[in-house]
Image (cartoon, helix red, strand yellow):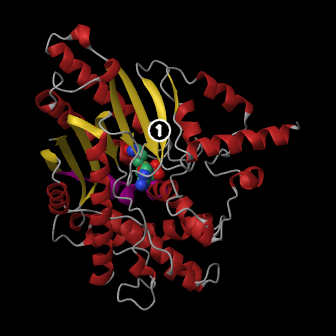
Amino acid sequence: MTEKTKLHCTYSMIFRYFQSGIVIIGPSPLCFHHLLKWIPSPYNENGKENIKDFDKIKRRMSNNRSSREPDSYTMNGGKGAYSYSNNSSSQRAGIEASKDIIDEAISKELDLTKLSLTSNAFSVVDLGCSTGPNTFIAVQNILDSIKQKYQSLSLDSEIPEFLVYFNDRTSNDFNTLFASLPPNKQYFAAAVPGSFHGRLFPESSIHFFHSSSALHWLSKVPGECLNKNSLAWNKGRVHYTNAGSEVYDAYAGQFAEDMGKFLEARAKEIVFGGMMVLILSGIESGMCHSKQPAGLLYDLLGASLMDLAKKGVINEEEVDSFNLPLYTATPEEMRERVERNGCFSVVRMEMMKSKLMMDVFLTNVHLATMILRSTTEDIVSKHFGSGVMDEVCQQFSAKALDIAKKLNPEEYQGYRLLVILKRN
Ligand SMILES: C[S@@+](CC[C@H](N)C(=O)[O-])C[C@H]1O[C@@H](n2cnc3c(N)ncnc32)[C@H](O)[C@@H]1O
């Protein structure tokens, strides 16, 4: 077998394993490391895929929209300049800001004596984990709090073994994630690929779910926004920010549907008394969407794409048919979904103010551009073709610099919505 054929077979195998939902599991990722040494990384030093070498294997057709999995886009992999792992400090801030509240919820509300543990294993899941390092920080905080709770109850000898499942879409760069697992971790690690809008685990098998900066990603763009004959057709924009109410309503409907499916799946998977922590972009009810930093970011991305269309780099119909599947929910919407599901009680529901993104915008346009790039390059490139992102970022930076001089930061406010639920 030639090296090329070996490589092809191994990658095809790994992809089939991920797609079929088979879990890769082990206290130390030794086998994975051997594989990683043997297989060259599919990401270059900038965190972009080495398409030249891997396109046959992944059968990626960058401009063939009909061939795509609906949920195939994800964050930039690898550890390069444009990678998520190097540009995720704003998301990390959300994990850090929630730490004490989660700790308190575990200490006061998680009844360890009533949780059923099969084979003395406590299972924790991070949904939408991406490539790290944020997921490792979030998981460690949770494990520390749980161990602390055992100790505070003088149950030191009953501290279980921990099994941590890292979930993300199949196209996530799990190689980078597992290659960067903390060497001194005190848990077993496993990958569970697939969309969190559906079932991922057997019934009553999980004790603790966590998800940060992931649930505001919708399962898809609402169909009406792409239909020229619909009032919700989102011509010339890429998001509902500054669009008509029909567009917003279509997005809100998609979020409600997605969150319904999410809660339904988790309700089956979590044990009675188990806890779920969700951290996502939030907005106060009635607040103007264009006055939140994320809205500003999406608007500038849309304007940058329209500029490229005017220059003839891309065409306008392509912009019309492109929308970001991202939604910022109000606490009321979340509560309504939880109540409708009926399987969870709300332990905490908090809007946490976040100045960070606005500060980044005003003081560090380069970082704002990197945040945009690391999170949207995949979805943008899959729609407009690989190679367009450099120009998108140039346009975006120029616009962001310009707007940063003019806007009044007092008018903008970012929020994170923190929701802690317990299975009834
Ligand atoms: C901004 S990253 C957040 C990563 C990490 N949780 C953090 O806080 O830094 C969002 C992640 O959610 C994942 N994601 C979005 N929708 C998903 C879905 N339906 N199922 C699983 N993962 C999803 C994306 O692929 C991406 O890796």
Q: Is residue 243 above or below residue 193?
A: below
Counting from the top left corner in percent of width and height, residue 306 is at: 52, 80
Is 161 displayed left or right of 27 in the figure?
Answer: left
Q: Mark 1 points at which residue?
A: 132
Q: Which residue lies furthest to the top in this view?
A: 157
Q: Main secondary structure of the magenta part?
A: helix
One can see residue 191 in this view: yes
Q: Which residue lies furthest to the bottom in this view?
A: 229
Mark 1 lies on a secondary structure that is loop
CA neighbours of label 1 inside 10 A, class few (<14), some (14 to 19), many (20+): many
Q: Is residue 133 above or below residue 298?
A: above
Magenta-drawn stretch contains 352: yes
Is 357 displayed left or right of 195 in the figure?
Answer: left
State the residue in front, 32 or 294.
32
One can see residue 407 in this view: no
Counting from the top left corner in percent of width and height, residue 373 is at: 52, 58
Q: How many labels does the image show?
A: 1
Is 344 displayed left or right of 374 in the figure?
Answer: left
Q: In which quarter of the image is residue 261?
A: bottom left
State the residue in front, 48 or 422.
422
Quadrant location of the C terminus in the rendered image: top left
Q: From which residue to which does the magenta span run?
A: 351-367
Q: Quadrant of residue 126?
A: top left
The amino acid sitting under disc 1 is Gly
State the residue in front, 201 or 81.
201
Counting from the top left corner in percent of width and height, residue 381 is at: 60, 65
Residue pictured at 57% horizontal, 47% vertical: 19
Q: Is residue 260 above or below residue 323?
A: above
Magenta-drawn stretch contains 216: no
